[in-house]
């Protein structure tokens, strides 16, 4: 039976609605840390945590540098910074160059999380208009983690999920509603382990 210590979710154009649907499905007993990257134009205040929090039973907040990654919390990448997970499972913020014109980048988060959690990681790539997340998801799967991707035809912008499938393959390709249902079932089951 699948269960995970961490779930990384990435999206771009159209991502707030898609991520909201997934977070809404997570039970308050979720035993995983959930880390979200949504591309936000630089210079904007980060309203994501405040927008997502009412739609989720878990606490939602912006990740801080050197903060421990704790189960049962949802963390959102701050705008203008790459968000990484260190091997000792703390967050690190970086001002390295944008990846696919994006900072924060899905690739950066997914790759660092893959090394920290390996087979205990679930990576999810949702709607978006570039190829960010494809290489990160490839590394997640290469290191034993699981990769789910939104069915491109159902995405607000198809490029990101299509690139992820082409580059990394996927353990599941599904609609947002189906992914949300699977997440809810997964963590309902995980709490009995």
Image: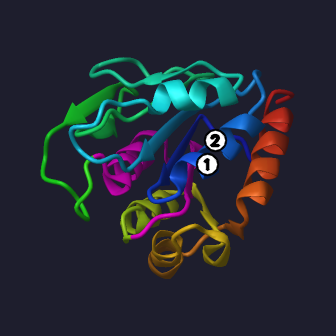
127 to 28, vertically: above or below: below
**Residue 172 in view in this figure:** yes
The residue that disc 1 covers is 17
Magenta extent: 104-129
Left or right: 19 as drawn, with respect to 175? left
Question: Where in the figure is residue 47, as x and y percent of width and height?
Answer: 42, 30
Residue in front for this viewpoint, 90 or 161: 161
What residue is at 68 percent from the left and 44 percent from the top?
22
Is residue 112 placed above or below 45 in the rendered structure? below
Q: Is residue 189 left or right of residue 102?
A: right
State the CA–CA distance, disc 1 to disc 2: 5 Å
Q: Quadrant of residue 59?
A: top right
Q: Residue furthest bottom?
A: 166
Residue 177 lies in what quarter of the image? bottom right
- Identified at 37% across, 70% down, the residue is 130
Residue 1 visible in this rendered orientation of the protein: no
Q: Position of residue 184 (x, y in %)?
A: 80, 41
What residue lies at 35% left-to-right and 17% top-to-bottom? 67
Q: Which mark is residue 144?
A: none
What kind of element bears circle 1?
helix
Q: How is the image coloured?
A: rainbow
In terms of depth relative to the viewer, which is nearer, 181 or 87?
181
Point out the image quarter for the C terminus.
top right
For disc 2, the marked residue is 20
Residue at x-position 32% and y-position 21%? 64
Q: In the rendering, at what x and y percent does residue 39 appear? A: 37, 50
Residue 2 against residue 57 in the figure, above or below: below
Nearer to the camera, 82 or 130: 130
């Amino acid at each position: 039976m699948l269960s995970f210590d961490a779930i990384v979710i990435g999206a771009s154009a159209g991502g707030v609605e898609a991520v909201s649907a997934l977070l809404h499905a997570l039970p308050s007993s979720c035993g995983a840390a959930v880390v979200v990257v949504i591309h936000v134009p630089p210079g904007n205040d980060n309203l994501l945590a405040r927008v997502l929090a009412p739609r989720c039973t878990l606490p939602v907040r912006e990740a801080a540098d050197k903060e421990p990654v704790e189960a049962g919390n949802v963390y959102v990448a701050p705008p203008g910074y790459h968000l990484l997970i260190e091997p000792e499972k703390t967050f690190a913020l970086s001002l390295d160059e944008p990846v696919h014109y994006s900072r924060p980048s899905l690739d950066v988060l997914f790759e660092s999380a893959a090394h920290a959690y390996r087979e205990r990681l679930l990576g999810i790539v949702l709607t978006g208009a570039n190829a960010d997340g494809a290489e990160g998801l490839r590394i997640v799967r290469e290191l034993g983690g699981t990769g789910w991707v939104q069915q491109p035809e159902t995405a607000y912008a198809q490029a990101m999920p299509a690139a992820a499938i082409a580059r990394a393959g996927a353990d599941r390709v599904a609609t947002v509603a189906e992914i949300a249902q699977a997440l809810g079932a997964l963590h309902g089951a995980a709490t009995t382990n």
